[in-house]
Amino acid sequence: MDQVKAKQDDFTLCPKFTETFAMLGKKWNGLIIEVLLHEHTQRFKDLAAHVEKCSDRVLCERLKELEEDGIVSRNTYPGESRVDYSLTERGRELAPVMDAVHQWSDRWCGCN
């Protein structure tokens, strides 16, 4: 019994895991990533249309944070005022994670 208690007391969350969940768990980030996984490159207004209840201010904030985290790329075009967003390789590698969330939600959430 003492060995079991010692093993439980030794448990700590990995800092990398904690950092990942802080990023993925932030409101709207998962939805932004999901849209970009399926719609690929999106202009701000199109991304905002997909993530309907997120204000433009918060969406802009989240995109900047995801860009700083190396998940989203902000693309500008010389000579044009066009800006769009896409996932980096790092962001695209979240596809299996998002698929697992879909599978879990299909099984456990009563959403229609």
Image (cartoon, rainbow, N blue to C red):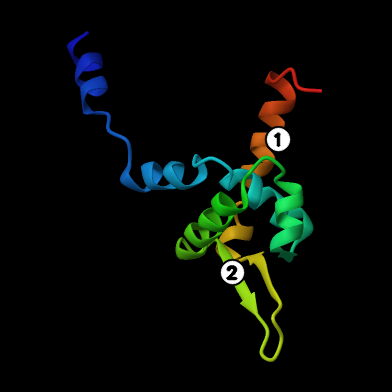
- Residue displayed at 65% across by 45% down: 31
**Direction top: furthest residue:** 1
- Indicate the quadrant containing the N terminus: top left, top right, bottom left or bottom right: top left
Q: Is residue 74 above or below residue 108?
A: below
Which dot, 2 or 1, sits closer to the camera? 2
- Residue displayed at 33% across by 41% down: 14
| Mark 1 burial class by Cα count in 10 Å: few <14, some 14-19, many 20+ | few
Query: Answer yes or no: do the residues labelled 2 and 1 have beta carbons within 8 Å?
Result: no
- Residue that numbered label 2 is attached to: 73
Location of residue 76 in the rendering, given as x and y in whole percent from the top left corner? 64, 80
| Mark 2 burial class by Cα count in 10 Å: few <14, some 14-19, many 20+ | many
Location of residue 102 in the rendering, given as x and y in whole percent from the top left corner? 70, 35
Q: Nearer the viewer, residue 48 or 87?
A: 48
**Direction bottom: furthest residue:** 79
Q: Is residue 81 left or right of residue 29?
A: right
- Residue displayed at 71% across by 77% down: 82
Give the quarter of the image for residue 91. bottom right
Location of residue 57 in the rendering, given as x and y in whole percent from the top left corner? 56, 53
Q: Is residue 1 left or right of residue 75?
A: left
Mark 2 and mark 1: Cα distance apart in space = 24 Å
SS at circle 1: helix
- Residue that numbered label 1 is attached to: 102
Q: Is residue 97 above or below residue 81?
A: above
SS at circle 2: strand
**Direction right: furthest residue:** 112
Q: Nearer the viewer, residue 76 or 1?
A: 76
Location of residue 19 in the rendering, given as x and y in whole percent from the top left corner? 38, 47
Q: Amino acid at mark 1?
A: His
Q: Is residue 3 above or below residue 103?
A: above
Give the quarter of the image for residue 101. top right
